[in-house]
Image (cartoon, grey):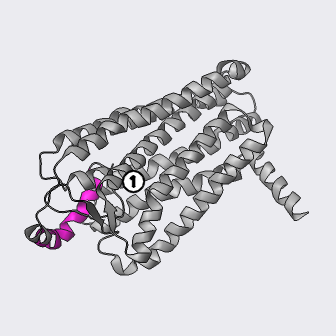
Amino acid sequence: MQETLFCLGVVHLLPYSMSDSNTTAFKNPSTFILLGIPGLETAHIWISIPFCTMYIIAILGNFTILFIVKTEPSLHEPMYYFLCMLAITDLVLTTSTLPKTLSIFWFNSREIDFSACFTQMYFIHCFIEMESGIFVAMALDRYVAICNPLRHSAILTNPVVAKISLVVMLRGCVVILPLVLLARQWPYCRTNIIPQPYCAHMAVVNLACADTRVSSYYGLSVLFCVKGLDMIFIAVSYTQILRAIFSLPTKDTRLKTFGTCSSHLFVILAFYIPNLFISLIYRVGQNVPGYFHILIANVYHSMPPALNPIIYGVRTKEIRGRLLQLFTHEGG
């Protein structure tokens, strides 16, 4: 998605960019200029309100999930370990983008250091890949719990969960590293203006004065080979899960069993459906303004980290019960 989406706003900036490049000769500038959401500059203050709200909810919600799982021994199970990984990933992902985005909206603080831009790029894409991998791990946990419940604790032992977690983290770090190293080695001598509020991969690479097809091809290969395979694995897992559920004897049993994986299903949909929606808009919405693409893409990065703890808090009985217990105790 990142490989082609954010380049649309460049069209609106050509006069400014060209004049800047005519008057300034530089190679690998010391700073980049983040424009926020071009075309909606006058509305930046109003746009900041929902983004700030989502950030606050993401911070409070995910820290609450971490606190509840840590303090409740009955939640020390593979499903909740993976949920903690998801919470940490969401915290890093939102903190990588939203503070800088809000500083642009509120204080017009548009500059970002050259190296800091690529560091931000690495964290954004690395933790998006990690999140996708965590969903695969959660799908595996639900598959074993429903299709082979008697051996769940024997299969997903703590050492196995630790190894799966390590693989998920290393995969994200290793796969994204060449993406950023390739982007960093290009010469940047046209303009240092990035038409969005953070340093996404192709938005930066498109500023390079070189043939950057290698970066584009590698980014697409990561998209299809990593996220695509993750989606296939999740789909296969849930196909087997649904077959197992429908083979249960009573409707109540089927509903109760499905309820144990409904939260995971909701967060997967919140993660992947906006991605598909954005890709569809890009391909068929040729008359859609560039700022709309950028705005929707920012919502895509900001909304799941805020929604995930709410979904698990509302739909997971154990977490919901622990939350009510905490509030009741405090109220008493």
Magenta extent: 4-19
Residue toward you, 155 or 210? 210
At x 65%, y 53%, the residue is: 63
Q: Residue at x 85, y 61 (%)?
A: 330
> Can residue 235 be seen by looking at this rendering?
no
Q: Residues within 10 Å of mark 1 (few under 14, many from 20)?
A: few
Which residue of the protein is positioned furthest toward the left in this rendering? 22
Q: Is residue 62 left or right of residue 318?
A: left
Residue 93 or residue 273, whichever sits in front: 93
Question: Which corner quadrant of the image does residue 85 belong to?
Answer: top right
Above or below, 139 relative to 287 = above
The quarter of the picture where residue 328 lies is bottom right
Q: Is residue 101 above or below residue 223?
A: below
Quadrant of the image containing the C terminus: bottom right
The structure residue drawn at horizontal position 43% and vertical position 36%, both measured from the top left corner, is: 172
Given residues 162 and 136, the one toward you in this image is: 162
Please indicate whether residue 177 sits to the left or right of residue 74 in the image: left
Q: Name the residue beneath numbered marker 1.
A: 277
Question: Which residue reaches farthest right?
Answer: 332
**SS assignment for the magenta stretch, majority:** helix
Q: Is residue 185 left or right of residue 58?
A: left
Residue 5: say if magenta. Answer: yes
Q: Amino acid at mark 1?
A: Phe
- Residue 204 appears in the picture as rendered: yes
In reply to whether residue 43 is colored magenta, the answer given is no
